[in-house]
Amino acid sequence: MKKARLIYNPSSGREIVRRRLPDILDLMESAGYETSCHATKGPEDATKEAARAVSRGYDLIVAAGGDGTIYEVVNGMAGQKARPALGIIPCGTTNDLARAIGIPKSISRSCDVIKRGKKKRIDLGKINNRYFINIAGGGYLTNLTYEVPSKLKTMMGQLAYYMKGLEKLPSLHPIRVKMENRKEVLLDEEIMIFLIANSRSVGGFEKLAPQADLSDGKLDVIVVKKANIAEIIRLATLAMRGDHIKDPLIAYFQTDYLKATTSSGEQVQLNLDGELGGQLPCVVEALPGHIELFVP
Ligand SMILES: Nc1ncnc2c1ncn2[C@@H]1O[C@H](COP(=O)(O)OP(=O)(O)OP(=O)(O)O)[C@@H](O)[C@H]1O
């Protein structure tokens, strides 16, 4: 039998994974994998455990949790030479990556995806010395993902993020950012927020980067230029339908390399897949087909 390592975050989303663990192990066995598991204890634990699973030669790593757990697991795998395939059991609050790939939220159906065995190579983003699988962002609204308390997410799900977003709107202010590719300066102005997306689905908005494709070797950059609160609310409404892209307050382009710096003299934090990821300046590169994922 092949061997799988299940890395799960017991605190993810509405905390169902802990209760369903016997079912997951059973489903994994019927999928043909002898599975051992590791419950994460806190920040960085999934990264260490994933790196350990790679060095122990597991055939498969399964990440059960939210986007933050998948991010940590990917960071433990991405820098290694031989990378096993990755399965995902979405148990988080938003589950952007699972939505983008079409992995069902039901535990038994997401295990079925692994059982059927269809795999696809997807790109990763490398940003400074870290990796992201779905989204990197910078600017003031991006830090709301780690300001929402875990308890609130357990109780309210996605709504907890939107409430925190509204609460933070009045404190938003622009930052001066310069973006360059290998040849030219693409943008040098005051902006509110920038997002570098690998998939279409970001923050529960399923069409935020409508042209993004996880396997095209490119990253999609969306920049919200200097705007007031009313304009930001208008853009958020447009973004639900994917209609924000043509707005004059948005810059949207694809690239496989990006350098971003700030001259504001302020610290601009980076958010990687919903987790804290250092600060500007940054160099971002697309790593084509770097991870093999089980897909429906
Ligand atoms: N045992 C634990 N208790 C508390 N936090 C943990 C534990 N294990 C891991 N973490 C932290 O939880 C965060 C990741 O949460 P995760 O993304 O899986 O769920 P979520 O936040 O509910 O979902 P989403 O990212 O979809 O909103 C990471 O910051 C990780 O370090």
Image (spheres, rainbow, N blue to C red):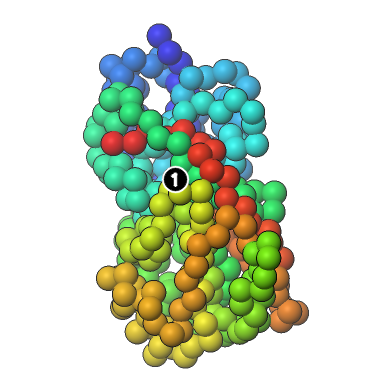
Disc 1 crowd, CA 10 A, few/some/many (<14, 14-19, 20+): some
Residue 71 drawn above or below residue 58: below
Q: Is residue 260 left or right of residue 229?
A: right
Residue 239 location in percent, x, y? 34, 73
For image coordinates 49% across by 76% down, the residue present is 251
- Which residue of the protein is positioned furthest toward the top in this rendering? 1
Residue 246 drawn above or below residue 220: below
What's under tag 1, amino acid-wise?
Ser
> Could one spot residue 142 in this view of the protein?
no
Residue 295 drawn above or below residue 97: above
Q: Nearer the viewer, residue 148 or 219?
A: 219
Residue 210 drawn above or below residue 13: below
Quadrant in which the N terminus appears: top left
Residue 273 location in percent, x, y? 50, 54
On the image, which quarter does residue 137 sit in?
A: bottom right
Q: Is residue 226 left or right of residue 116?
A: right
On the image, which quarter does residue 199 sit in?
A: bottom left
Residue 37 location in percent, x, y? 46, 25
The residue indicated by pointer 1 is 215
For image coordinates 64% across by 28% down, the residue present is 81
> Could one spot residue 253 in this view of the protein?
yes
Q: Is residue 174 left or right of residue 210?
A: right
For image coordinates 57% across by 85% down, the residue present is 173
Residue 287 location in percent, x, y? 58, 45
- The mark total stands at 1
Q: Nearer the viewer, residue 67 or 245?
A: 245
For image coordinates 51% across by 26% down, the residue present is 84
Secondary structure under tag 1 reads: loop
Quadrant in which the C terminus appears: top left
On the image, which quarter does residue 112 sit in?
A: top left
Q: Nearer the viewer, residue 74 or 26?
A: 74
